[in-house]
Image (cartoon, rainbow, N blue to C red):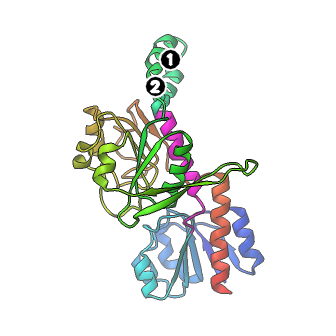
């Protein structure tokens, strides 16, 4: 089969496809040219950049499979594709650890003022060292704090696992899950296996009780955190979003930061990517990363191999 890998793929995934006898084209086709070229392929594999919408599906009747390297499927019209008889695959577990570690990394950073310190050290660290040290010496520890998780799927549970290891208490809200099991991941050289059962609670409880709130939800459902939700939170709360842009109202978040309702913020995702509103980018107390949650070497390899195997199994 002829397969278009349009947004890149780990070399091991490409190698696996070729070893199975498939022809793999890694020359990315611009979105506006796909409608005239996609019908030359049997399958298309994408990440988040390429959109596979109804119109493109209709213009490509030869396509039999759409693959998404990653968790979310919001750039694919999944229901319509399945109605047309197309197979749709993603890699829901491959990037779990990578996203969870980034969420926790952001937590560590914002409570110790690392976003501000990094910016100002680079600009005037030599002349203003003592002042910066004084400003950044008011950090807090994560141990003993409550981390609220909105969404309690794979990534949220992995985030909870790391947070529990840091001494944090976990509460979670998920409308589809009553309880979930969190495994404490210890290096295999240690003879230690333990699991903790976490019962989910209401969204209102998570908002009211959490010292920090981390989002782990799909996009496409509108704002999950808006002015009403911020008003229900503790004063001085921290917010982390390594899930999807558009799940938090950036206007409401900026207002909450300005009023000091929200003290700590970190985000890997934005309402528009690249961001068009520079206000968040310029705030000293906001930790930023450019949508890299799943972008570790290990995750990229797992994504490539998992998606390639799904394609091989389908066409076998």
Residue 36 versus residue 259: which sits nearer the camera?
259
Name the front one of labels 2 and 1: 2
Q: Which residues are magenta?
A: 91-110
Q: Does 258 appear above or below 20?
A: above
Tag 2 residue? 139
Q: Residues within 10 Å of mark 1 (few under 14, many from 20)?
A: few
Q: Quadrant of the C terminus?
A: bottom right
Asked whether 124 falls inside the magenta stretch, the response is no
State the SS at label 2.
Answer: loop
Quadrant of the rendered structure where residue 69 is? bottom right
Tag 1 residue? 124
Asked whether 93 falls inside the magenta stretch, the response is yes
Residue 26 at x, y = what percent?
Answer: 65, 68
Q: Residue at x 71, y 80 (%)?
A: 22
Judged left or right of residue 38, residue 53 is left
In this rendering, does residue 118 appear at all? yes
Residue 308 at x, y = what percent?
Answer: 66, 72
Q: Quadrant of the N terminus?
A: bottom right
Residue 44 versus residue 118: which sits nearer the camera?
118
Distance between the alpha carbons at the discs numbered 2 and 1: 21 Å
Q: Does 101 appear above or below 219?
A: above
Q: Residue at x 33, y 43 (%)?
A: 209
Label the magenta part by its dominant secondary structure: helix
Residue 311 at x, y = what percent?
Answer: 63, 78
Q: Does 101 appear above or below 61?
A: above
State the SS at label 1.
Answer: helix
- Which numbered disc covers residue 26? none
């Amino acid at each position: 089969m002829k397969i278009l890998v349009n947004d890149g793929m780990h070399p091991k995934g490409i190698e696996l496809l070729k070893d199975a006898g498939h022809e793999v084209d890694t020359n990315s086709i611009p979105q506006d040219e796909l409608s005239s070229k996609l019908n030359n392929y049997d399958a298309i594999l994408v990440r988040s950049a390429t959109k596979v919408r109804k119109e493109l599906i209709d213009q490509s009747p030869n396509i039999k499979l759409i693959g998404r390297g990653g968790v979310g499927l919001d750039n694919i019209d999944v229901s319509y594709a399945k109605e047309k008889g197309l197979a749709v695959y993603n890699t829901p577990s491959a990037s779990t650890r990578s996203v969870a570690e980034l969420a926790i990394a952001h937590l560590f950073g914002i409570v110790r003022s690392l976003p501000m310190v990094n910016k100002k050290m680079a600009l005037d660290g030599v002349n203003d060292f003592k002042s910066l040290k004084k400003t950044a010496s008011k950090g807090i520890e994560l141990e003993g704090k409550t981390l609220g998780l909105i969404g309690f799927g794979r990534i949220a549970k992995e985030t909870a696992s790391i947070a529990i290891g840091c001494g944090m208490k976990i509460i979670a809200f998920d409308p589809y899950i009553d309880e979930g099991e969190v495994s404490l991941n210890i290096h295999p050289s240690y003879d230690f296996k333990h699991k903790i059962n976490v019962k989910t609670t209401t969204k209102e409880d998570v908002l009211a009780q959490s010292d920090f709130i981390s989002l782990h939800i799909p996009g496409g459902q509108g704002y999950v955190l808006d002015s009403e939700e911020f008003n229900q939170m503790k004063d001085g709360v921290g917010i982390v979003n390594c899930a999807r842009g558009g799940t938090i109202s950036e206007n409401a978040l900026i207002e909450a930061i300005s009023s000091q309702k929200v003290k700590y913020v970190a985000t890997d995702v934005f309402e528009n990517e690249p961001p068009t509103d520079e206000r968040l980018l310029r705030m000293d107390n906001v930790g930023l990363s450019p949508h890299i949650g799943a972008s570790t070497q290990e995750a990229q390899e797992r994504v490539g191999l998992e998606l390639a195997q799904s394609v091989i199994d389908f066409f076998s």
